[in-house]
Amino acid sequence: MTPETHVAPTRPEPHRPTATGEMYPQAIDLDVVRAAHKAQYEQREEIIADGNVAAAIAALQMWRAVIFPGFPITPSTKWIETVASRIAGDAANRKRVKLLEAEHAVADYMVGAAASCRDLIVATATSSVGLDHMTETTRSLGASGLGNVMIVDVYRATANFPLCIEGDPSDTLAHRDDGFIQVCARGKQQIYDTMLQMPCLGMHPDVLTPTMPGYYGIKDSHRSGRLLVEADRDVHAWQDEWIVPCPLPGLINGDTAFGNCVTSRHFQGFKWSQKERLARVLDLLPEIGRSFEKKFGRPGLAYYDEVGFPEDGRVDVAVVGMGPDFGTFEFLRPAFADSRSVSVAGVAMRLLTPFPRAALRDRLAGAKVVLVVNQAHHSGRGHLTLDVVDALSDLDQPPVVVSAFAGMGGANVSEETWEAMLDHARLALAGHRLPPYALFHEGVRT
Amino acid sequence: MSGYKEIALRDSCFRPGSTLCPGCMEATTFQNVGRVTDNGKKTIVTIGTSCAEVSTMAFPDVVAWGRGEEPPDDFSRSFSIIHNVFESAPTLAESVRDMSDVLTEYGALKYPVQVMATSGDGGALAIGLRSLLHTIHRRTRVTILVLVNEIFANTGFQFSPATTPFAETSTTPVGAAQPGNPSSPLDYIHLAIAAGAQLVAQVSPSHSKLFVKTMERAFACTEGTAVVFVPAPCISGWKFDDGQAIHIGELGAQVGAYPMFVWERGKGGSVKDCPQAAADRPRLEDFLGTQRRFHHLVMPDPERGGFVTRTGQEETMVRLKEWTQKNVERLYGLAELK
């Protein structure tokens, strides 16, 4: 049945006012959408998947995700191909892939689709210059209140002179101010689990902010490993505990306007509200993470993953990094500590935006030296370094912060490189005054 | 199809209180389109950055959209509008259409929804040409309204790809080295047809019945995109007195600057109120003389009234008339396409 064959309704719909216009709650029957969902998995299964497939499966399992806009992505990331393949393989599946002509068009499309029905999730994936091409609209989306938008970013550098497709978080870190909630995942399982949790955060009525889960290109996007997938019905049951009907009207179920041209006073108030909504993420993210762990038995969302901190938090060197290369540090940490007779701990950042400065401050307060490993191009000491220095600035006697760049351009941060960086940090431990930052590559300081 | 008088009595979703210039063709267009959309279907409009956007969506003082003084009890008369970025109105309309269709297919939405995108020619034909053509190419069942005032009016009356040759704009000024706009306009009607539009029209409220009926046909399209280019004489940018927009809109169509044209895929089309032979049309000079953007080319004729070519501008006028004739013949040719 096409829309043109409908008979116009004759009975008035109950409606009620909201802060952003009139709402007709009964215009869209979401129960029908939920009931029509075709399950990807009837029960928990262990499969082999790479990061892109893990992220695609999670998106497909959400009953609220019915349209997947996409562009082939530059450089290639096969998230949308995976979604398309699974939908095409099931004649009963009513979900749609929408292929558009550019990343900018994808972002624009997400605005309209998400605004049309604020209770349904609109997800896509991009990477590198693709994310840059979306920027005009991602910055609008960040302020839109459309928490049902999710852009999966596969981290890659953004330079085209020359082009490189290796994992480098320059893209996501260049978009810290777009207004999205940005969470880094590492490993297939964490990618899958993060995807399932992000809409619960973004669509929370106190937050209503789009989300940008991400993971490293190639290192995590293209390398396969074991993945535990949950039954769709369990995913739905858990998400439904967190995702409630949006309190504000959408284009279809409302008499409303988006994107008005406002006076300065309203704009100022709006920006204040946007900042407050983003700050609320800091309260909700751990709650959602704990709820996820309780339901599925795996760690849920957290500000960061940590390793090696004693109960009192006192260590000689604390490392702050992100991404899969942190795993190499975790592997060599005990041997390095023994061989150098120092205590070493570390955190791998997960919540990038908003930055969990208070929690990180408390975690690092007992360290003598904090080594921050930056993997993205930055004009100064590094994105992470500046945030860590800011977080520690509350302390009366903050640890010495040592800033390092390693793994830029997607290079593997080898054991030798980690050891070189940690030895560099030991110099600070011994009282040496170090330069604002140092570059490390293939085991040597350059 | 509804009767013209019946449509004229409907409740427009374009409300009083916009800050568009008094007598602006855009306001007249919206008032008329707004009445056409009062047809038992919920209306959703996507709007690109333009005069129309900044002048009608001001908040909290004025939001010049909505049906009725209060939100309607009847959902089918409810109205929503969204603005995103300069170039995105067609893509937004497509996404709204798709979401409505998907929900309908699921059985989750039982009410019909009609979707219209509106942009200026700067938004649709310059920065937004990608969005316009690809939405058409995907045969999206939306109506796209392009208000063609031949300039980026909202930002200071700069040249656009639709500017008439030799017109003065703020970025194609008239001087000793250049007689206004040096380039020919983009053939946007042909582009829309070639991209796969179901209905393509060039018509303004100056031809009121034709305009309203064309808009009704546009909203009734079920096989693809309907694109209506609305010649929109701009009081400030074309430099004429308020109250003249309807007259200039009509005269411009009659002289061949922007002939009325209605075409539908599979049926062909026609040019209205603009004979193919130049001798059968009003004089081009009399159209140019109504706007100060062409005053470097024409001047009042004290003897017979009307306007004549300024001394020294004869060659430019010949070239402009040649372009106008080609413009008319081009549309007659396009009308033959099926």
Image: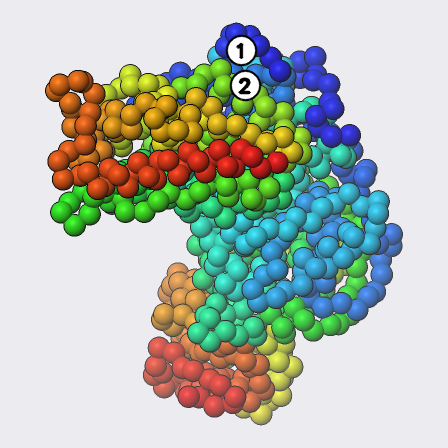
Of the pair A424 and B237, the residue shown nearer to us? B237
Point out residue A202 in the picture as x, y percentages from the top left corner.
59, 46
The location of residue A336, given as percent across then percent down, is 58, 87
Residue B149, horizontal then vertical, whole percent: 35, 33
Mark found first going from the N terminus, 1 or 2: 1
Q: Is residue A65 above or below residue B278?
A: below
Number of marks in the rendered image? 2
Give the secondary structure at mark 2: helix
Secondary element at tag 1: helix
Answer with left or right where residue A38 lies relative to residue B86: right
Mark 1 to mark 2 CA distance (whole Å): 7 Å
- Please report the residue visible at 56 percent of the width from the left and 73 percent of the height from the top: A165
The disc label shown at residue B144, or none? none
In percent of width and height, residue B12 lies at 49, 16
**Chain letter for the residue marked with disc 2 in the picture:** B
The residue that appears at 59% across and 61% down in the rendered structure is A73
Residue bearing the label numbered 2: B213
Task: Answer whether residue B82 is visible to the viewer in this image.
Answer: no
Type of amino acid at the residue the image marks with label 1: Tyr
Q: Residue furthest right?
A: A42
Residue B101 is at least partly visible in this image:
yes
Which quarter shows the N terminus of chain B?
top right
Q: Which residue is mark 1?
A: B4
Residue A50 or B12: which is nearer the viewer?
B12
The reply to whether discs 1 and 2 touch (Cβ–Cβ < 8 Å) is yes
